[in-house]
Image: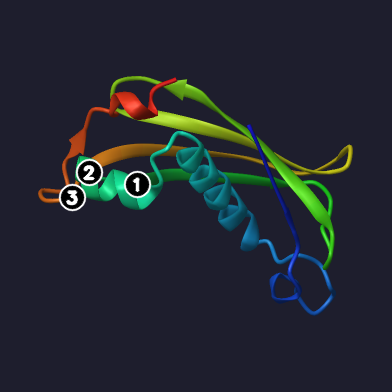
Amino acid sequence: MIYSRKVNFYETDAQGVVHHSNYPRYFEEARGFYLESLGYPYEKIRKELNIDIILLELKVRYKNPLFFGDIFKVDFYISDMDRFFFTFKYTVKKENTVIATGETKHACINRDNRKIVSIPDILRI
């Protein structure tokens, strides 16, 4: 799946480069886009299924910079999934240049007791 957007000025540092702390946010935006494409935006999952999707691990590898006004895309997919855990892999690109790569690992928890639960069918690939 591909999520695309433009770099905002506030995302850049004093050198005009996107600050490293924004890449996890880009990953999160892409995951939100994925949930919306399933017809289950995060607020609906929380309300109807009574679960939260939690982040367990985050990896980012920085390769090239992005600058204010750049249009980029996040190409991402679920690489691994079992009963309780799933992992997304991401490639951030500007045109054909790889900007960064990354991974996030997640689990679902019951909102009431905060215990890990099986991944709902709606999220299964």
Q: What's under tag 3, amino acid-wise?
A: Arg
CA separation, marks 2 and 1?
17 Å
The earlier-in-sequence mark between 1 and 3 is 1
Name the residue at the left extreme: 113
Q: x%, y% of residue 16?
A: 84, 73
Q: What's under tag 2, amino acid-wise?
A: Glu
**Does 80 appear above or below 9?**
above
Q: Secondary structure at mark 2?
A: helix
Residue under the image location 28 percent in, 38 percent down: 108
Q: x%, y% of residue 14?
A: 80, 80
Q: Nearer the viewer, mark 1 or mark 3?
A: 3
Q: Is residue 118 left or right of residue 31?
A: left
Return the mark for residue 54.
1
For disc 3, the marked residue is: 111
**Does 21 appear above or below 83?**
below
Q: x%, y% of residue 106?
A: 39, 38
Name the quadrant containing residue 45: top left
Q: What's under tag 1, amino acid-wise?
A: Ile
Q: Residues within 10 Å of mark 1 (few under 14, many from 20)?
A: few
Q: Quadrant of the N terminus?
A: top right
Q: x%, y% of residue 12?
A: 75, 72
Q: Secondary structure at mark 3?
A: loop
Return the mark for residue 48.
2
